[in-house]
Amino acid sequence: MGLQRTSTGLRRRHTLALLTAGAVLGLGRRAPAVALPAELVQPAVITPAAAFGLFNHVGVAGDRLVAVGERGRILLSDDSGRTWRQVAVPVSVTLVTARFATPQLGWAAGEMGVILKTQDGGESWKLVLNGFDAANLMLAEAKADAASAPPMPAPDDGLGTPEMQNAQTLVSFGASVPFLSLLPLSASRIQAFGAYGLALESLDAGETWRGIAARVPDPQGLHIYGAALMGQNLIAVGEAGLLLHGAVDSPLATATSPDQGSLFGVVIPTPSTALAFGLQGTLLRTFDFGASWQAQSPVSANGVLCGTVLRDRLVVLGDESGNLLLSTDAGGSFRTLPGTLPITALAQAPDGALITGSPAGLRRMEV
């Protein structure tokens, strides 16, 4: 599809905004000599009102909780979510996810292709990647793959391979494409996925990055919303029912989806079970590491935005109407705790409490 995706792009950006605070994915080209967007150079504002904004994810760093959200805000809690404090962040873009490989080493990512790194449990952060550089890394990978591939007839549209088209699309969007998911594989190796097939990997704890689109089959450049490890197997889910699976060090394969709705995340309730969730309460389940999926009854009439698995293997999902959906049988059945505000983040605190995020801030509750 490449560059010729204007109408579908508008529909897809509406879905993407559900997970990124309603921000519109810009389509303008970057002028050769313009300065970086203000959000990439202006630090997040430190404000007493920070705890009352939108939070998209709560990461766990040992005994600490790290919440990330709109305008570059990052809050830390060292008492299982009873109190929070804001820390300095070098950018003011909306952050979508935060993941930790150790209690000290972690990353946060979000809009404008931003990836941040911390080595002190979230006390301080540095910018290690922005959207301009991410797109150029994808293009460099596509050119290298094309140069090393056996000679083949040129595509009829003259735009090059799907990988090349997707990379050129990312470059044309400038810094507007967000990262949506981070997956630490070790203390030194981390993968990052995002909109329009954005897929990169770092082998040095985030200091440098390389494109990995050749190992992530996504010829249409669909958004990759979530990724998780199931043993030594990677499962990634995304737009239009995208389901990818495979060994960590091998090219991923595409699985057939029984539902074409967008999937916003995946959780692993048991070593042999994974659940993918998304639009209109869609719930899919796999028992073979993502090779095949079965559709379950919808768990909600609304989009399911986030999920987690608690230490007692209780599956908790949150939907856009504020409902919590709880399962004690690895997704076989659910009961509903009704709510009002969209649930945008879920995590278990060190003391066992459930932390939820919403457009109105963070909440601690017993389950």
Image: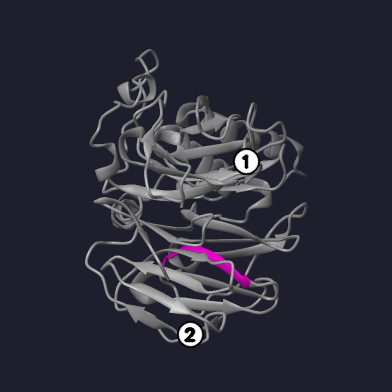
Find the magenta span and give its range.
Answer: 262-269
What amino acid type should be assigned to the residue bearing mark 2? Answer: Gln
Q: Is residue 263 magenta?
A: yes
From this view, report whether residue 281 is shown above or below residue 145.
below
User: Which residue is located at x 54 percent, y 54 percent?
Assistant: 350
User: Which residue is located at x 40 percent, y 25 percent?
Assistant: 88
> Would residue 267 be found to the left or right of residue 335 on screen?
right
Q: Nearer the viewer, residue 14 or 314?
A: 314
Residue 176 in percent (x, y) is at 37, 36
> Would residue 158 be found to the left or right of residue 231 on screen?
left
Q: Give the main secondary structure of the magenta stretch.
A: strand
What secondary structure is marked by label 1? loop
Return the mark for residue 296.
2
Estimate the spatial distance between the alpha carbons at disc 2 and disc 1, rounded to whole Å. 36 Å
Residue 66 in percent (x, y) is at 47, 43
> Mark 2 or mark 1: which comes first in sequence?
1
From this view, report whether residue 249 is shown above or below residue 329.
above
Residue 2 in percent (x, y) is at 46, 47
From this view, report whether residue 107 is shown above or below residue 347.
above
User: Which residue is located at x 51 percent, y 62 percent?
Assistant: 352
What amino acid type should be assigned to the residue bearing mark 1? Answer: Pro
Q: Is residue 336 visible in this depiction of the protein? A: yes
What secondary structure is marked by label 2? loop
Q: Nearer the viewer, residue 94 or 153?
A: 94
Q: Do the residues labelled 2 and 1 touch (CB within 8 Å)?
A: no
Label 2 vs label 1, nearer the camera:
1
Q: Nearer the viewer, residue 278 or 74?
A: 74
Q: Is residue 26 visible in this depiction of the protein? A: no
| Residue that mark 1 sits on | 103
> Would residue 244 be found to the left or right of residue 365 on screen?
right
Q: Does the magenta stretch include residue 297?
A: no
